[in-house]
Image: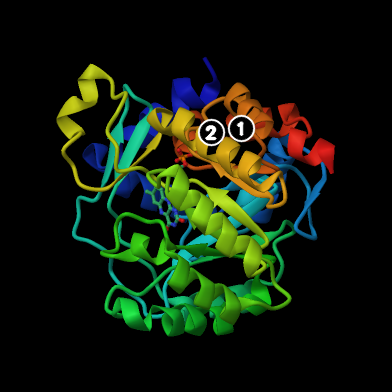
Amino acid sequence: MSLFARAVRPVLFRLGGGDAESAHEWTLHRLASMPPAAREVMRRRYAFSAPVEAFGVRFPNRVGLAAGMDKNGLALPAWPALGFGFVEVGTVTAKAQPGNDRPRLFRLRESEAIINRMGFNNAGAAALAARLAELGPIGVPLGISLGKSKVTPLDEAVEDYLESYRLLHPYADYIAVNVSSPNTPGLRSLQDRDFLSTLLKELSGPVPVLVKIAPDLTEPAIAELLEVCLEHGAAGLIATNTTLARDDLAPGDRHLATETGGLSGKPLTERARAVVQFVHDETGGRLPVIGVGGILSADDATRMLDAGATLVQLYSGFIYKGPDLVKAVAQSARPSRAAAAR
Ligand SMILES: Cc1cc2nc3c(=O)[nH]c(=O)nc-3n(C[C@H](O)[C@H](O)[C@H](O)COP(=O)(O)O)c2cc1C
C-alpha cells in the first residue's frame, strides 16, 4: 500500500468530520500556499518527462488534471509539481455563481467513486482572467473549461460562452467547451447540432477548442456531434464527463445511489473507454481525444490510450490514489494507437 493510501488519505478523508467538500477546500488551500522550496521537493519526486504533441500543443507528459478540481486556478503552480503534464481549470462561467446547496459532493469509498452536484460554483471568468494575468505561465499547458452561467437562458447561451472566451482565451493553450455537466439544468441539450455548430463557428480562432461530452449520449448522438465537430474545426474531444447512471456500485455505497448528480471514478471506467473507442473509430482518429473517466491505475490509462486517446486526465483517481498515480500513468503511458498511426 502506498504512503498516500496508508497515511495521507485517511487523514484527508476524516477532515471536516468526513465532509468531502471540506477536505477538498482544505487541500486546495494547502497546495495553494505551498512554498516554492516544497514545490521543488514535490517536483523532484513526481514530475516525469515523456513529451507528446497534440492539436499543435506540446505536453511534457500525457497526464492532465481534469476540470473541476481547481475551478478558480487557486493552486495552479502546485499541479505540475505533483506530476501533471497539463492542467484544465474551470469550469468557469461568465457570471460568478455559488453553485448548488451543500452537501453536494459525496465519496463512495467502496466503489472508488464520487457523486457531485456542485453546479459550477466559481468566481467567474473575469476573476480567473485576473488570477492568470497575475500568475503568468505555469510551465505546462493550460486548458480552460467554459460553461454556461446558471441564470442565462439556454437561448442566450452562445453569448454567455463568448463572454468567458473573450476574457480567457489569451491565457489558454486550449479551450474546453463544457456542454456535458449534468448539474446545470438544460446544459446537456447544448450538445445538439444547432447550438454546437453556432458556438464552434463563433469560437474559431487561434486557440484550439475541444468539446467535452457526456458518457450518457447514445452512439447516434455522439456520431452527430462528431460530424459537427469535424465540420466546424473543433481541435478535439474530451471524453467523458460524469454519468447519470448508477451501475456497478459496491453494496456499501448503494445508500448514496439516490443522491442527485454525476457519478465518476471506477464505475465509469468501462463506459468512458467505450466512448473514446467509438469516437476514435467513428472519426478514423481524425479528432484527438483526451480520455477521462475512471482511470484509477496505470493499466486503466494504458487501456484508454489503446482505445484511441492521445492524452488522459484524472479526477477521482487522484482523490483515491494521490500523486503516485499521476507518476505511474505518466511513466507507463505508451504512444496510443492513434498517435502511432499519425
Ligand atoms: C467534484 C467534481 C467536480 C467536477 N467539476 C467539473 C467541471 O467543473 N467541469 C468539467 O468539465 N468536469 C467536471 N468534473 C468531471 C471531471 O472533470 C471528469 O470528467 C469526471 O470526474 C470523470 O473522471 P474521473 O472518473 O477521473 O473522476 C467534475 C468531477 C468531480 C468529481
Per the rendering, the mark at residue 273 is 2
Q: Name the image quarter holding the C terminus.
A: top right
| Residue at (44% x, 73% y) in the render | 195
**Residue 153 place in picture, x, y as percent:** 28, 80
Q: Is residue 248 above or below residue 188?
A: above
Per the rendering, the mark at residue 156 is none
| Residue at (53% x, 61% y) in the render | 89
Say what secondary structure mark 2 lies in.
Answer: helix
- Circle 1/circle 2 CB separation < 8 Å: yes
Q: What is the residue that sits farthest to the top in this orientation?
A: 1
**Residue 254 place in picture, x, y as percent:** 19, 26
Q: Is residue 74 visible?
A: no
**Taking 90 as reference, is 331 left or right?**
right
| Residue at (51% x, 39% y) in the render | 275
Q: Which numbered disc flags the more N-terminal residue, 1 or 2?
A: 2
Q: Is mark 1 within 8 Å of ligand 1?
A: no
Where does label 1 land, which residue?
304
Say what secondary structure mark 1 lies in.
Answer: helix
How did the renderer colour the structure? rainbow
Along the line of sight, the residue nearer the viewer: 300 or 199? 199
Q: Is residue 73 above or below residue 6?
A: below
**Taking 337 as reference, is 29 left or right?**
left
Separation (CA) of disc 1 from disc 2: 6 Å
Q: Amino acid at mark 1?
A: Met
Which image quadrant is residue 110 in? top left
**Taking 5 as reference, is 264 left or right?**
left
Q: Amino acid at mark 2?
A: Arg
Q: Is residue 284 visible?
A: yes
**Residue 300 place in picture, x, y as percent:** 57, 26
